[in-house]
Image: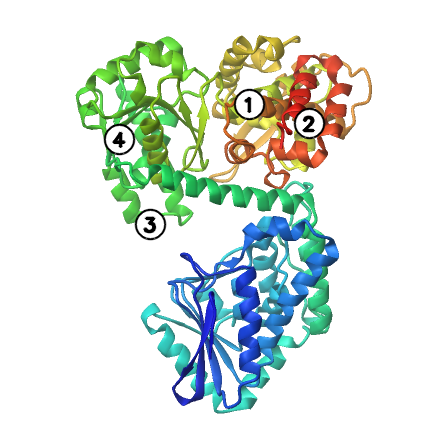
Amino acid sequence: MYSGITMSLFWLPEEFVEWRLDMPGPVNILNEQAIREWGEALDVLENTSGIRGVIFTSGKNSFIAGADIKGFPSLFSGSENHVERWAAHCQELCNRIETLPFPSVAAIDRFALGGGLEFALSADYRVISHGARLALPEVTLGLCPGWGGSVRLSRLMGLDAAITYIVEGKTIDSDTAVSRCLVDLAVKPEDLLNESMALLKSRARSPQLWQGRRELKRAPIQVHSLKQKDVKVTTQENAYRAPAEILHLVSTSASEPFDKALKAERELFAKLAKSSDARNLVGLFIAEQALKRRNSISSASMPKADVGGVVGAGVMGGGIACQMAVSGMKVILKDIAQPALDLGVNTINAYLSKQVKRGKITSSEAEIACANVSTTLSDEPVSDCQILVEAVAERFEIKSSVLSALEKRLPAGAILSSNTSTISISDLAQTLSRPEHFCGIHFFNPVPAMPLVEVVRGEKTSDETIARAVAFAAAIGKTPIVVNDGAGFYVNRILFPYFNAFNLLLNAGVGFLRIDAVMERFGWPMGPAALADVIGLDILVHADGVLQQAFPDRMLHQVPVIAEKLLGEGFLGKKSGSGFYEYSADLPGTRLKQPSIRAEVYAAGSIAEHEIADQEIVDRLMIPMCLEAARCLADNTIHSAEDGNLAAVMGLGFPRFRGGPLSYIETVGADAFVRSASLLKKLGPLYESGPLFKASKASSQLVL
């Protein structure tokens, strides 16, 4: 009947038709070619008589992964009207499925996401395999559904149920899909086609059945059926507005006529598509996919590490060991003191218990992970390790001594690494006999929750060692980004100018409660004072000292350091119960925080020379971080702007919709950013940008 590159139509017995989606590549993506063929296939169906029904199937082991996000930057570069016309065309394709003169069934295996679910919602009936997932995750890209998904989902599930899935982008499992009347049947994967075909045949006997289904799907929801729905629209009333816009769309369109609701959806889609939020989020998504492919290629030929070791059984070491064990590795956890080993084991048990409670792993998987870890006070078991991560105290002399001793125990081809967060890998390698097998593998705390791992290349680190370290990090469920050596590497190097700027604000008389509130509204998950407490003031002050020594021209403090004063009185932050905030237990598993009186006293020593507006607080904190990120790109600490943006988002919690520090400069505009920095030059060298940006303009824009 029809044969295209991405989809085909076949006659089946009894005058039924199979519409098979089978795009080149591992999954079905509705790209420009597929959208064109979608229309051509509909032309054939609409002009062929005698068809009793159509079944939508996939030639893959899944249904449709969604629209082609890689094509969005080009699409969104056009006018808002251009984007709206594109969405209107895709809406019309869905409408044409819905108005075919015979019934349709979508057979959904594994997943139907975004545009893939919108395609399936256009069918009259849906059959899903057990365990399959459905979602409209457009909000995670700063967008709303654009092909009618918000309209149809609301009318199929009911407004209250649909809002959560549309506004928050949550996944709908197969059981929920059935109970909420989103799909008609959930079946075993091996029965999917037969059951879908049986449903189609039964409904084809009576036009009233499938025509009535269409009328119900297109009917507005009566106003009296609407309920108030509490939905997590924003975090701390931050500047990411897409969820609020989508909530308003869905709530107001539900009672509108079908065509009017579709028009409102595509208008909002076009509006959001032209926003900096969508540009940043789409850019991050594309960069993440490219990074995964790059890491996969570089590590494809590397041998899998089955046995690994962690030396230093503190909270960080325990977290690393836990991550390795959950991934299936045999782990040797070593320390020189039994209490330290006990702490490591307790850390592992706590992490596993938390993951079981959250449904991330089962109890049996937690037991297996525990069994994968063996502890030792001896050096001898280390000789079995294919990769070893040193996680002892952040002191050069201690790390250097431990690494030298461990290297002698390791097999000749094993990878030796350090989890240091600030110390030069090249310096640590100086006492090693095989520096080519040594690199940094820098995890972030808490290890199970933080996706990023910095793989640090020292001066003598071999390409093979880097590839094996990348393969190891990916195998245990982390996202590795390769950075070149230097004090603080990338993430900590850009973080500490931010903390330095925070300290300047405190000394200028701005309260840390206000600073935290402003930065949370800006989009950070927590402000700098709360972040300092989470990191630990002892760790913060030590790392700050390393970076001051490495970059004295701009990172040396010119005013008293409030964190040092608090540390001097024994305040360590959240782990000790006191830092900038006082922490106390409330309900089980929760902790309350109140501002520390001592911190308020230390931070109240100055009176601001002028009224400091919220935007100035943002500028004072963001400009030093972004400038340092630009320096890291200029001196090849990071290999690309995309890596720098991703690392900041995954390692620091940089507001995702802001795109990362380098994208933030682009969003503000390089000229406007430089002007803002120049207005703050009187505060010190943290805000010096001239030479960097002059160099960037001379070399085709260093910063994006």
Q: In terms of depth relative to the viewer, which is nearer, 50 or 404?
A: 50
The correct choice, above or below, for 669 with respect to 45 in the image is above
Q: Nearer the viewer, mark 1 or mark 4?
A: 1
Q: Earlier in the sequence, mark 2 or mark 1?
A: 2
Q: Nearer the viewer, mark 2 or mark 4?
A: 4
The correct choice, above or below, for 225 with respect to 666 in the image is below
Judged from this view, the residue extending furthest toward the right is 610
Alpha-carbon span between mark 2 and mark 4: 42 Å
Residue for badge 3: 362
Q: Earlier in the sequence, mark 3 or mark 1?
A: 3
- How crowded pointer 4 is (Cα within 10 Å; few <14, some 14-19, many 20+) is rated as many
Residue for badge 2: 515
> The disc labelled 4 sits on which kind of residue?
Gly
Residue for badge 4: 308
Examine the rendering and report whether any part of residue 323 can be seen.
no
Q: Earlier in the sequence, mark 3 or mark 4?
A: 4
The quadrant in which residue 214 appears is bottom right
How far across and how far down the image is residue 210, in percent?
54, 84
The correct choice, above or below, for 279 with respect to 62 in the image is above
Secondary element under disc 2, as helix, strand or loop, is: helix
Is mark 3 in CB contact (under 8 Å) with mark 4? no
Residue for badge 1: 632
**599 lies left or right of 171:** right
The quadrant in which residue 235 appears is top right
Alpha-carbon span between mark 1 and mark 4: 31 Å
Name the mark on residue 183.
Answer: none
Secondary element under disc 1, as helix, strand or loop, is: helix
Alpha-carbon span between mark 2 and mark 3: 41 Å
> The disc labelled 3 sits on which kind of residue?
Thr
